[in-house]
Image: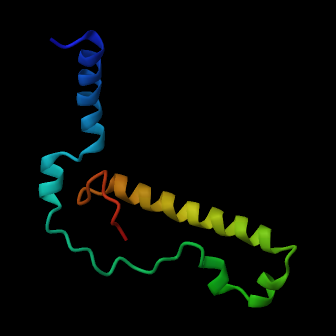
Amino acid sequence: MATATQKQNAVSSKSQRSKVRTPYFASAKHLSDNYTNLGYDYRGKILSKTTSSELWANPIQKPLFAQIEAILTFILEQVKYIKKTMSIAHGKEDTNIN
């Protein structure tokens, strides 16, 4: 016979299982996805590729440029989120969108 603690742990483990595993239909739907040509990985390289290297050599200005870089990356990620939200061709949980 199971104790009350064992029953409680069994119930909580069932509720945790759905949070850990992906649903079967989601995994079956994306089983043969082959994402290629997703674009250039711009994270951390936007300002360094477009500005002079002498600007980045100054240790006083480097934290400022790093913050600007983080802001630009955040803005681009939010644009991707809006694009994904308004798209009828992509699922809301998709992460591979260009």
Instruction: Look at 30% across and 14% down and name the residue there.
Output: 5
**In the orientation shown, which residue stands out farthest toward the bottom?**
53
**For residue 18, which quarter of the picture?**
top left
**For residue 47, which quarter of the picture?**
bottom right
| Lateral position of residue 24 relative to residue 9, left or right | left
| Lateral position of residue 69 relative to residue 12, left or right | right
Instruction: Look at 13% across and 48% down and name the residue there.
Output: 24
| Lateral position of residue 20 relative to residue 32, left or right | right
| Lateral position of residue 4 relative to residue 63, left or right | left
The x and y percentages for residue 45 are 59, 79
Task: Tell me the quarter of the image containing the C terminus.
Answer: bottom left
Using the image as rendered, state which of residue 19 and residue 44 is in the foreground.
19
**In the orientation shown, which residue stands out farthest toward the front?**
1
Visual colour scheme: rainbow
Q: How many marks?
A: 0
Instruction: Look at 23% across and 60% down and name the residue there.
Output: 89
**For residue 71, which quarter of the picture?**
bottom right
Task: Tell me the quarter of the image containing the N terminus.
Answer: top left
**In the orientation shown, which residue stands out farthest toward the right?**
60
Name above or below for residue 29 compared with residue 73. above
The x and y percentages for residue 49 are 62, 86
The x and y percentages for residue 43 are 54, 72
Using the image as rendered, state which of residue 61 and residue 14 is in the foreground.
14
Instruction: Look at 27% across and 10% down and name the residue there.
Output: 4
